[in-house]
Image: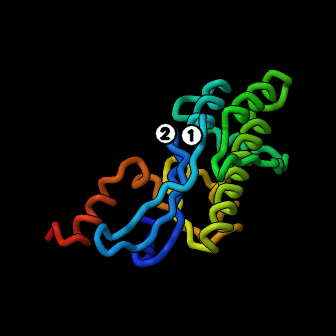
């Protein structure tokens, strides 16, 4: 759904960012398995989508909270730039949840807290991507997963990288990807 099936014959990076994953993999062509996928980095604890939903629910939003959290964040005029610490390319997001809870406790608006949360996730993705590019070079990136349907995050990533996004409807499971690989392997007519 990212309309980049041609990447299957090239080297590229791919992220899946949801409530269950915050994972970055290196992908390269492979004559036997079509594509060789090498895990590169991930979140060592809380996943990005978990942070979004936990903070959103704490604010009184319905689960899943991503769409409503985005609506709050666009109302904030704050700009946050976060210093992200990576551990061998991997991130830690549990501190993000704690920081957002502290912001709310200290009287920050829901709008500003939502903006901080999304900016922190964006800055984390950018840091993880830059770390991977320092090793693999400047490669195209494919983003998938529920968190990647966020327009604030997407816009910032598009400004930073040569990147492509899977449609949210195709980010929830891999049935379409499995069908494509079966067809490419000649197991499907």
SS category of the residue bearing label 2: loop
Residue 156 falls left or right of residue 57: right
Where does residue 120 sit, x and y in percent of width and height? Answer: 73, 45
Q: Are marks 1 and 2 in contact (CB under 8 Å)?
A: yes
User: Which residue is identified by label 2?
Assistant: 20
Q: Quadrant of the C terminus?
A: bottom left
Q: Quadrant of residue 72?
A: top right
Give above or below for 182 relative to 46: below
Where does residue 73 sit, x and y in percent of width and height? Answer: 72, 43
**Residue 49, labelled with which disc?**
1
Does the rendering let one see residue 156?
A: yes
How crowded pointer 1 is (Cα within 10 Å; few <14, some 14-19, many 20+) is rated as many
The residue lying at 72 percent from left, 39 percent from top is 114
Residue 32 falls left or right of residue 68: left
Give above or below for 154 relative to 71: below
The residue lying at 51 percent from left, 58 percent from top is 25
Where does residue 79 sit, x and y in percent of width and height? Answer: 84, 50
SS category of the residue bearing label 1: helix
Marks 1 and 2, Cα distance to the nearest angstrom?
7 Å
Residue 37 falls left or right of residue 184: right
- Residue nearest the observer in this picture, 23 or 40: 40
Does the rendering let one see residue 74?
A: no
């Amino acid at each position: 759904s990212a309309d980049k099936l041609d990447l299957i014959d090239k080297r590229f990076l791919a992220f899946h960012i949801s409530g269950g994953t915050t994972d970055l993999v290196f992908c390269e062509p492979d004559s036997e398995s079509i594509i060789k996928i090498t895990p590169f980095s991930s979140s060592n604890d809380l996943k990005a989508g978990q942070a979004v939903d936990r903070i959103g629910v704490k604010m009184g939003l319905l689960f899943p909270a991503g769409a409503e959290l985005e609506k709050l964040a666009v109302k904030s005029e704050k700009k946050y730039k976060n210093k992200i610490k990576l551990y061998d390319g991997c991130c830690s997001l549990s501190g993000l949840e704690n920081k957002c809870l502290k912001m709310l406790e200290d009287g920050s608006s829901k709008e500003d807290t939502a903006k901080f949360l999304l900016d922190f996730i964006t800055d984390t993705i950018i840091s993880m991507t830059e770390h991977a590019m320092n090793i693999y070079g400047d490669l195209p990136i494919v983003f998938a997963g529920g968190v990647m349907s966020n327009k604030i995050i997407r816009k910032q990533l598009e400004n930073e990288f040569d990147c492509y996004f899977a449609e949210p409807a195709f980010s929830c499971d891999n049935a379409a990807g499995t069908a494509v690989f079966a067809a490419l392997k000649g197991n499907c007519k």
